[in-house]
């Protein structure tokens, strides 16, 4: 069954179920001072070492020193900060306390760096290329001043993705820490329970949080196996809001949700890239710039926008990054030109086609495997459209859908024992990922990055730009290198964003006043003190 037909059936089913639900009165709201959040994120243990729970907990229990606002500005969260030249000082804000009653100190910050170095393969304080060459702790243990190996005007923004750990819980127990201990946080909420059978995680207020009682008294996070079921639950009032890290509601469902007077639809400027065709620039055939650019010109970007984005979606620029990015410069918009595609392929020796209509060179068909995450329908559907577009000009695409763990191992540096083995992949670049390191999505492109590196670019010119972005000592200097980076993307086509979009959120209209976090959307620490319940 085609994706379009599946969506039409879903929309009809939603309307029928919503009508039945309303007539039967089965969708009455839960306790008025509570909120139910729905998500399709897979959470099996609800412990700190589980990726999806770790990211979710950032809005409830496990705080980073700083947050990113909707404008890209860095704001204090757990800590105040001061950056001067090659030093960064983090000062724990007054009253910050772990939920077991212990004060949060700068020693917790230092311990977190040491833990990540030792157990997560980071290089914050260890190794010849460590981020920091040393530190000074204040006598009262409230501040730590870190010395950067090289100046980096944007260093503090990287701390928005580092959740601080309680030293008194972990030290000496790193390999034996219990699930309960791993959930201890210092945010406005604390973990109450995880009913795995029911698929519900519950958070309640943390009485030690210095800002006081959040406006929502209890939050339940319901886990759903499928996006369609989740959206139905939102539409009929069984869920108040949908949570998806670095994303909102899939645009597929917005039309039907807009018909529900009990829901508020909110569009927010996006800082991520929802779908990117990522070439492995070190593997055949994408070690050839002519092939990369031939693929770029063969894609129908209007069709990607119309099929996958909301009404606010746009065709991306060749400079890759969204306009909300710090250092953004306008570059040529991506466009389809199949004559250019064929001419570029001819430059690389692809002048004939086989009996199936695919280009050949040295008796070998121009073909590649496109890797996708089997659990993400958007990636699969984007891959299908890439496959159709490229078949039309004579390039064969074999779609390889892998389970999440295998997909991560195949496409990134962090999860595999070797360099990424994919030829190309459909990926989503998160807001945090787009801003990390030198920003501009550079950690996804640079092949030597220790976590991502999925595009496997080792070009020396780009390596120099990457280093310059991460060592700029003034904002003017950074903006200059940001322009160079985007021009390099234009000239070399290491990746191709398929469409750009806003984050579209839908939530029960009995709530109002959400604020937006640049990394986590409308579900974030600040929202708990701004949201109002009607």
Image: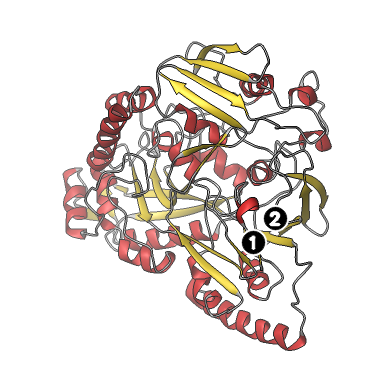
Label 1: few (<14), some (14–19) or many (≥20) C-alpha neighbours in 10 Å:
some
Q: Position of residue 80 (x, y in %)?
A: 56, 29
Picture mark count: 2
Q: As displayed, is residue 235 above or below residue 19?
A: above
| Residue found at x 50% / y 65% | 266
The answer to whether marks 1 and 2 mark residues whose Cβ atoms lie closer than 8 Å is yes
The answer to which quarter of the image holds residue 142 is top right
Left or right: 529, with 258 as reference point: right
Residue at mark 1: 532
Between marks 1 and 2, how big is the CA–CA gap?
A: 7 Å
Q: Position of residue 179 (x, y in %)?
A: 81, 37
Which of pointers 1 and 2 lies earlier in the amino acid sequence? 2
Confirm whether residue 419 shows in the render: no
Is 502 in front, or is 395? 502
Q: Is mark 1 on a helix, strand or loop?
A: strand
Q: Position of residue 156 (x, y in %)?
A: 48, 29
The answer to which quarter of the image holds residue 37 is bottom right
Q: Quadrant of the C terminus?
A: bottom right
Left or right: 10, with 395 as reference point: right
Q: Residue 298 carries which label?
A: none
Left or right: 21, with 5 as reference point: right
Residue at mark 2: 215
Q: How did the renderer colour the structure?
A: secondary structure
| Residue found at x 68% / y 51% | 42
Q: Position of residue 171 (x, y in %)?
A: 77, 20
Q: Is mark 2 on a helix, strand or loop?
A: loop
Label 2: few (<14), some (14–19) or many (≥20) C-alpha neighbours in 10 Å:
some
| Residue found at x 53% / y 71% | 253
Is 200 in front, or is 262? 262
The answer to which quarter of the image holds residue 476 is top left
Q: As displayed, is residue 188 above or below residue 503?
A: above
Q: As displayed, is residue 129 above or below residue 530?
A: above
């Amino acid at each position: 069954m085609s994706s379009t037909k599946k969506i039409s059936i879903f929309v009809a089913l939603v309307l029928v179920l919503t009508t039945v639900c309303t007539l039967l009165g089965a969708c009455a709201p839960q306790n008025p001072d509570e909120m139910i959040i729905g998500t399709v994120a897979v959470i099996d243990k609800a412990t700190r070492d589980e990726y999806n729970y770790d990211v979710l907990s950032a809005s409830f229990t496990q705080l980073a020193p700083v947050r990113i606002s909707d404008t890209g500005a860095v704001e204090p969260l757990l800590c105040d900060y001061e950056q001067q030249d090659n030093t960064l000082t983090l000062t724990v804000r007054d009253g910050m306390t772990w939920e077991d009653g212990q004060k949060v100190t700068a020693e917790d910050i230092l311990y977190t760096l040491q833990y990540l170095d030792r157990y997560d393969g980071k290089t914050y304080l260890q190794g010849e290329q460590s981020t920091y060459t040393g530190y000074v702790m204040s006598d009262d243990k409230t501040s730590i001043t870190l010395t950067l190996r090289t100046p980096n005007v944007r260093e503090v923004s990287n701390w928005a993705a580092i959740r601080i750990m309680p030293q008194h819980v972990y030290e000496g127990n790193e390999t034996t820490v219990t699930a309960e201990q791993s959930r201890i946080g210092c945010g406005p909420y604390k973990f109450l329970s995880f009913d795995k059978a029911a698929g519900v995680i519950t958070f309640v207020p943390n009485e030690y949080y210095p800002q006081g009682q959040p406006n929502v008294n209890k939050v339940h996070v319901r886990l759903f196996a499928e996006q369609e079921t989740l959206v139905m639950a939102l539409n009929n009032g069984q869920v108040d809001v949908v949570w998806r890290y670095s994303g909102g509601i899939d645009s597929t469902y917005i039309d039907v949700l807009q018909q529900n007077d009990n829901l508020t639809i909110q569009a927010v400027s996006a800082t991520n890239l929802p779908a990117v065709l990522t070439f492995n620039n070190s593997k055949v055939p994408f070690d050839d710039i002519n092939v990369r650019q031939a693929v770029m010109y063969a894609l129908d970007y209007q069709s990607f926008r119309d099929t996958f984005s909301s009404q606010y979606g746009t065709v991306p620029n060749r400079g890759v990054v969204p306009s909300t990015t710090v250092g953004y410069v306008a570059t040529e918009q991506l466009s389809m030109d199949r004559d250019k595609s064929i001419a570029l392929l001819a430059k690389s020796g692809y002048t004939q086609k086989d009996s199936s209509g695919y280009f050949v060179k040295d008796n070998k068909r121009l073909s590649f495997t496109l890797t996708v995450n089997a659990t993400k329908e958007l990636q699969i559907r984007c891959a299908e459209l890439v496959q159709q577009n490229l078949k039309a000009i004579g390039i064969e695409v074999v779609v390889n859908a892998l389970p999440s763990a295998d997909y991560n191992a195949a496409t990134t540096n962090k999860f595999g024992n070797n360099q990424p083995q994919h030829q190309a992949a459909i990926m989503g670049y998160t807001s945090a990922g787009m801003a990390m390191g030198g920003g501009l999505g550079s950690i996804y492109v640079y092949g030597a990055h220790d976590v991502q590196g999925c595009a496997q670019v080792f070009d020396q010119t780009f390596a120099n730009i990457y280093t310059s972005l991460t060592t700029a000592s003034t904002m003017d200097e950074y903006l200059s290198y940001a322009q160079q980076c985007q021009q390099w993307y234009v000239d070399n086509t290491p990746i191709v964003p398929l469409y750009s979009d806003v984050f579209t959120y839908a939530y029960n209209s009995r709530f109002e006043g959400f604020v937006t976090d640049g990394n986590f959307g409308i579900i974030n620490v600040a929202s708990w003190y701004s949201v109002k319940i009607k």
